[in-house]
Amino acid sequence: MIVVIGRVGEEVPESLVDQWRSRDAALLSPGDLSQPGWRHVPFSASDAGDGQAVVAGEEVAMSDIEAVVSTIDTITTADLPQIVRQDRAYVAAEMRAFLLAWLTTIRCPVLNPPTPLSLAGCGWRPEHWALAAGALGIPTETVAEPVEEDQGARDDGGFTVSQVGEDVVDAPSPAVAGWVRQLTAAAGMRTLHAEFRDVTPPRLVSARVVPDFRRAELAAAALAALDGTRP
């Protein structure tokens, strides 16, 4: 089984689950974290399959989980309508801390591994991406919050480029592909979604860790990246 961590109703995680049906993919949503059946055995000296999770409402042995992909950076109060209102902030913080520990200590491949800033990678703010890009000599625009939109041409004359594992998709030139590879490596990540202004030379507008996995080629590249990390 491949576990995709995401919110019910969000297109990216649900698309991954749909595209990976042949690998028994399933969605682990914030609601699963409040269900009975969890058993976490961090740093166990015994079998790597110790422990149990709840995925899509079902109890799953850790030995049955091949890999995990996280598409959310945190747990919010909005994710927990089943929890009484006055307790949601506390429960959200505890769930986030648990997921951070779980993702850090499980022995199967995780794309991308969490950090204290995010459950889905480096958790950099726009200013950090811009600073890192500038240090690499990548031209940048004025810092802006990343926007959610489809891959491909932007209405303002820009374009997006994605890296998943070793694959860089939609780069208009080897130079831009090289920039994306450098920025992904600088962040310590294996995936990246970068938006550029289409000028000469192109300028980085924003970046985020999770690409648009609704695209079949990116979902396939993610699966190859996960398979490539197996012992």
Image (cartoon, rainbow, N blue to C red):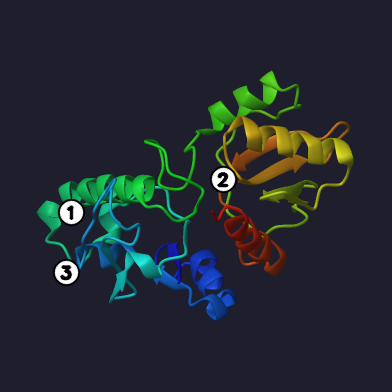
In the displayed structure, 54 sits above or below 210; it is: below
25 sits left or right of 219 in the view: left
Q: Position of residue 154 (x, y in %)?
A: 74, 52
Position of the N terminus, as image quadrant, is bottom left
Nearer the camera: disc 3 or disc 1: 3
The residue shown at (30%, 60%) is 79
- Res 209 label: 2
Describe residue 152's horizontal placement relative to residue 115 as left or right.
Answer: right
Q: SS class of the residue under badge 1?
A: helix
Q: State how far apart marks 3 and 2 are (Cα).
A: 31 Å
The image position of residue 177, as x and y in percent, is 80, 41
Snapshot quadrant of residue 30? bottom left
Is label 3 or label 2 in front?
3
Query: Which residue is tagged 1?
Result: 88
Amino acid bearing label 2: Val
Mark carried by residue 69: none
Q: CA distance from mark 3 to mark 1?
A: 18 Å
Tell whether 105 sits left or right of 111: left
Which residue, given by chain and number where applicable, does mark 3 sit on? 36
Which residue is more in the foreground, 148 or 16?
Answer: 16
